[in-house]
Amino acid sequence: MSRILIVETKNKTGESVELFGWVHGRRDHGKIIFIDLRDRSGVVQVVFTPQDKEQYKIAETLRSEWVLKITGKVAKRPETMVNEEIETGKIEIQPESLEVLNSATTPPFALDTDGREIGEEHRMKYRYLDLRRERMAKNMALRHRVAKFIRDFLDKEGFLEIETPIMTKSTPEGARDYVVPSRLYPGKFYALPQSPQQYKQLLMVAGIEKYFQIARCFRDEDTRGDRQPEFTQMDLEMSFVEREDIMAINEELLIKIVETLMPDKKIQEKPFPRLSYKEAMEKYGMDRPDLREHPDDPNLLAFCWVIDFPFFEKTDAGEWIPNEAEARSVPSRPRTGWTFTHNPFSAPKPEHMEWLMEKKNIGEILTTQYDVILNGFEIGGGSIRNHQAEALKKVFEILGLEEEIITRNFGHMLEAFGYGAPPHGGIAWGLDRLVALLADEPNIREVIAFPKTGDARDLMMNSPSELEEKQLKELHLQIKK
């Protein structure tokens, strides 16, 4: 006999089975002890009676979250005892043997609720227990299914899944980098990637043509309720394409994810409606409008595309560059009154390329950027890229970067484009956000296995934490108070 999952017992009436799991609950009814046994697939009722003295004696000691091995016979429940709320509600287990694999201390909070009544920091501290609850287990399973569906879909479309480095170079992409000091090269640092942006473009130069990745990204941003220092993107890039090609394949993938994995959900409008940035701002006052006709319907999904964004926007240079010393130490910050609205690697719309090359009408240049919106949240964004070195260099010049800084930060990209870069473009989805919306969760922490708190702490591992003096010396670092 070998182990089966609890959910499979519903089709095993009259057979003996071997089960492993946790004590989900215990009820004493007179002399009969009922144990709800839980594994990743569900819960089943196990009935202990005094006739088997040895097992009954052990059953009397069982407590919540103890780990058990049970062999027993699957029997039909009496009609009056059927529980229609669980998949195994028509059967129960009559135990033949019982083994305690591990006892457990009393959990710090109840695990048979959805957990919303418990303070989030308390849940985060004991996240490995919080993940045992049914709601969280379903969220993890949904996340897996979404990622697998993406992989299978893109594989059939000819994409290659390629991992890009986690330790890379610090370059300006819109947020602060997390940096990693080098022990072997004193005074030098790696950076954790804000996105795989440059690497995926270099893969296009390499001739891959169709790339994707379920990518980990890192941004040292100011704390905010729904931000995470590390998060996950579905990252995608294609060669020899135009904007319509990328939008079409992404729209098809999103529709199929919903219709296949979430059949109870309804997509309000197909194909997805499109709004220009100008239209969205004039009509809704934001570039991520919630177009749901009935916002109170949790199963209604209103997708839309927002296109034709301004490439550049004015910024108060004084806010970014208090002094020249900081300007030299943080070259990513704009030194003029212009900054990019999306990322510096986007291409302008073809009719505005001449303005970019001549650095005129800067505020009127529109970019090929496209954002996909769901129920008022941006779940993805991308663009056609500047694949010619001179055009990309003009973007950096408009941002006010000096030749030396352009070469130091982006010389590798400009050189690569000189070796015959194909036209290309792509997109990145916020996978955490998409899964949270599909799961009807209020924030992305509910669909991440081990998230940080809103202020970027890991209460379970107690990080960030201090380093020992020995480690600091090895890394050539000194803490100044």
Image: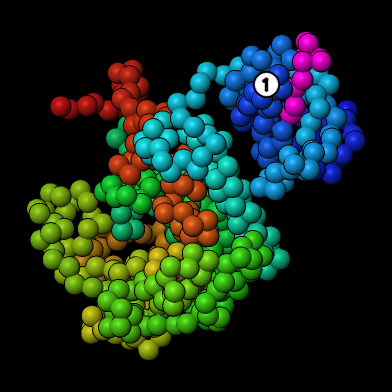
Q: Position of residue 361 (x, y in %)?
A: 23, 85
Picture residue at 90% right of the left edge, 34% below the top: 15
Q: Quadrant of residue 72?
A: top right
Q: Position of residue 184 (x, y in %)?
A: 40, 30
Q: Position of residue 368 (x, y in %)?
A: 41, 78
Answer left or right for 85 relative to 429: right
Picture residue at 77% right of the left edge, 20% below the top: 49
Helix or strand or loop: what does disc 1 sit on?
loop
Foreground pick, 120 / 172: 120
Q: For mark 1, does the 10 Å Cα neighbourhood hold few (<14), some (14 to 19), or many (20 or more) residues?
A: few
Asked if one can make out residue 65 in the rendered structure from this viewpoint, the answer is yes
Picture residue at 36% right of the left edge, 52% below the top: 226
Which amino acid is tagged 1? Gly
Within the magenta stretch, is there residue 54? yes
Picture residue at 27% right of the left edge, 83% below the top: 282
* Highlighted magenta segment, given as a residue range: 46-55
Q: Assign the N terminus to one quadrant of the image.
A: top right
Query: From the viewer's perspective, is residue 469 above or below residue 6?
Result: above
Query: From the viewer's perspective, is residue 72 above or below residue 120?
Result: above
Pointer 1 residue: 30
Foreground pick, 386 / 37: 37
Asked if one can make out residue 196 in the rendered structure from this viewpoint, the answer is no
